[in-house]
Image: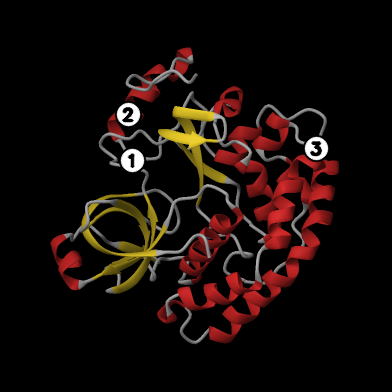
Amino acid sequence: MRFTPSFGEAGQAIRRMRGATQAHLVRLRDGSYCVVKFADNPVGSRVLVNELVSSLLLGELGIATPKPVILRVDEDFLRCNPEVVLTRDGAPHRPTPGWHFGSRFPGNPDTTAVFDLMPDAWLSRVVNNDDFLGALVFDLWTCNAGPRQAIFFRAKVDYSAETGDRWFAQMIDHDRALAGARWRFTQIPPQALAWQRIVHVLRPSLEDFAPWLARLRAMPDQAFDQILHYVPAEWVCGEERAFQQMIARLRARRNLVPALLAQALMSRPDEPRRSSSRQLSGRRNPVFEEDLYAPVLRKRSARRAHDHRKPRGTAQPK
């Protein structure tokens, strides 16, 4: 595969993230940072399988996503970071030592501003906004039951004709891909996907998706075989057969995607609803909405949201 997981060891807990899986931002012993989802999170261990499989498939399709890390959490980390606690049915408990899933953070959270929402008018300034079309193909293919989520940050990139410091997007949060915890694929109502922001912002035609459909068809069978080996055995203990069957169905499901995509595009409305971005995010829509990585930047953004100015310390997109 072109995109493979790396391995790491948890070193220092930074903060807890929002969300049902109760992920934590963690500094690894090599100095890098990851958003970690623990195997015994309240949603279940299939979350980790969904995240890792989705990351590997997105990478194989050439869609930008954080690099996956299979992360080792040991007793020393838990003893030195007592604030790392999960809550299930109202009762707190520590994560179990072992292998967990990490999503690589793009830089240092103290110096890199990362946002999880961008105004529709600015999406065209994202250097890799075509990846959202690929993500729509991916979401249809994997029966993603959740809204499409992404992070945005400025990075020095050499991307097609664009070079230098540009806005860049990565697709995140795939715990509800692969039909969520059920692993039983159904035909997603195309109306739900047609409301994705990128569809009504870029207004793509079916031809615009041709490169992504071609990549999906060309994905080698060996990629699926390798995925079976990359997922740690303890994540699918007792569910090995169900996991193998899910991957087999996913492989065969590629043939359905062109028809699902055509239905989704035909069902979209002529004009987007004004409340669409609020429905997708579940939150207000300021100029940027930063995802708890840098609380100082979040406060700055909130102060300036009313007059639609950019947060201080963030360069104006070009």
Res 29 seen here: yes
Residue placed at 48% from the left, 64% from the top? 52
Most extreme residue toward the top is: 307
Q: Quadrant of residue 205?
A: top right
Question: Reading the chain from its start, which is encountered first: label 3 or label 1?
Answer: 3
Q: Is residue 256 or residue 271 the one in the foreground?
A: 256
Image disc number at residue 297: 2
Image disc number at residue 195: none
Give the Cα separation between the discs numbered 3 and 1.
36 Å
Task: Residue 78: give x, y in percent of width and height.
Answer: 20, 66
Left/right placement of residue 22 relative to residue 257 reads left
Q: Is residue 204 above or below residue 92?
A: above
> Tag 2: Cα neighbours inside 10 Å, few (<14), some, or many (≥20)?
many
Task: Residue 58: give x, y in percent of width and height.
Answer: 57, 56
Image marks 1 and 2: residues in contact by CB distance under 8 Å = yes
Q: Is residue 101 above or below residue 117?
A: below
Give the Cα separation between the discs numbered 2 and 3.
37 Å
Q: Secondary structure at mark 2?
A: helix
> Tag 3: Cα neighbours inside 10 Å, few (<14), some, or many (≥20)?
few
Give the Cα separation between the discs numbered 1 and 2.
9 Å
Q: Amino acid at mark 1?
A: Tyr
Q: Quadrant of residue 295?
A: top left
Q: Amino acid at mark 2?
A: Leu
Res 186 seen here: no
From the image, tell me which residue sits under label 3. Answer: 205
Q: Amino acid at mark 3?
A: Ser
Q: Secondary structure at mark 1?
A: loop
From the image, tell me which residue sits under label 1. Answer: 293
